Image: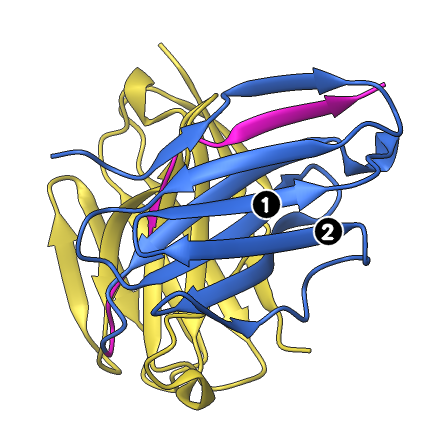
Amino acid sequence: GQQLNQSPQSMFIQEGEDVSMNCTSSSIFNTWLWYKQDPGEGPVLLIALYKAGELTSNGRLTAQFGITRKDSFLNISASIPSDVGIYFCAGRTPGSGNTGKLIFGQGTTLQVKP
Amino acid sequence: DAGVIQSPRHEVTEMGQEVTLRCKPISGHNSLFWYRQTMMRGLELLIYFNNNVPIDDSGMPEDRFSAKMPNASFSTLKIQPSEPRDSAVYFCASSLSVRNSPLHFGNGTRLTVT
């Protein structure tokens, strides 16, 4: 089945540093989403990307939809302690139509040292 | 705004017992998804509904698992009989069934089967 490879698996950084994580796939996706999950809660949508090459920002977060439609990255600038959590990429293939069915990456666990 | 509401938040039960998880999607959303999250396998889609009709249940692990959506505002996921390997966090998510509509997750039910 289709898979998303998300890296790195975990990151431990100093407050103020920038963070970058990415997802790749062997299949083409027509939607890329980035979610954050805090402990004890469900994933919360951060950024949604719908067009190849699209670059979208949400505060200190920036994400891009790869031009090949097989990858996406998420950058966090000037990290702060509340950025701690698990970040998931998720994608929707052309064949999923309007179903909303998403495939999730394995997640990147981010820890920020004050 | 009320998000996706799941109950209970935590469930501890003994092996062999029946477990029922409940979900109320966001009002107006007509697609509903049940996911299971474990450390080993990440987020796995179990089943999803569109307009109360099950569309894809290929992710349901065994016949012990069943899901229903009797109306647009309520869904259940039942495990009978439960086994220790069913221990996980179960998430419900909802979305509009239109192109590119993102998923909105509930806070999950943490199930422990002893």
Q: Which mark is residue B77?
A: 1
| Residue B84 falls in image quadrant | top right
For the record, the magenta segment spans B99-114
Graded by Cα atoms within 10 Å as few (under 14), some (14 to 19) or many (20 or more), the crowding at tag 1 reads some
For the residues labelled 1 and 2, the Cα–Cα distance comes to 7 Å
Front in this rendered view, residue A42 or B10: B10
Reply above or below: B39 against B77. above
Q: Amino acid at mark 2?
A: Phe
Specify the subunit that label 1 lies on.
Answer: B
Whether residue B39 sits left or right of residue B31 in the image: it is: right
What letter labels the chain drawn in yellow?
A: A
Residue receiving disc 2: B65
| Residue B19 falls in image quadrant | top right
Front in this rendered view, residue A85 or B11: B11
Q: Colour of chain B?
A: blue
**Label 2 element class:** strand
Q: Amino acid at mark 1?
A: Leu
Specify the subunit that label 2 lies on.
Answer: B
Give whichever of discs 1 and 2 has the lower sequence position: 2
Residue A49 picture location, percent across and down: 24, 68
Whether residue A62 sits left or right of residue A20 in the image: it is: left
Residue at the limit of the structure toward the front, as seen here: B70
Residue A31 picture location, percent across and down: 32, 74
Whether residue B5 sits left or right of residue B9 in the image: it is: left
From this viewpoint, is residue B103 visible? Answer: no
Q: Is residue B109 magenta?
A: yes
Instruction: For the residues labelled 1 and 2, say whether their Cβ atoms are less than 8 Å apart.
Output: yes
Graded by Cα atoms within 10 Å as few (under 14), some (14 to 19) or many (20 or more), the crowding at tag 2 reads some
Residue A10 picture location, percent across and down: 57, 37
Front in this rendered view, residue B83 or B19: B19
**Label 1 element class:** strand
Total labels drawn = 2
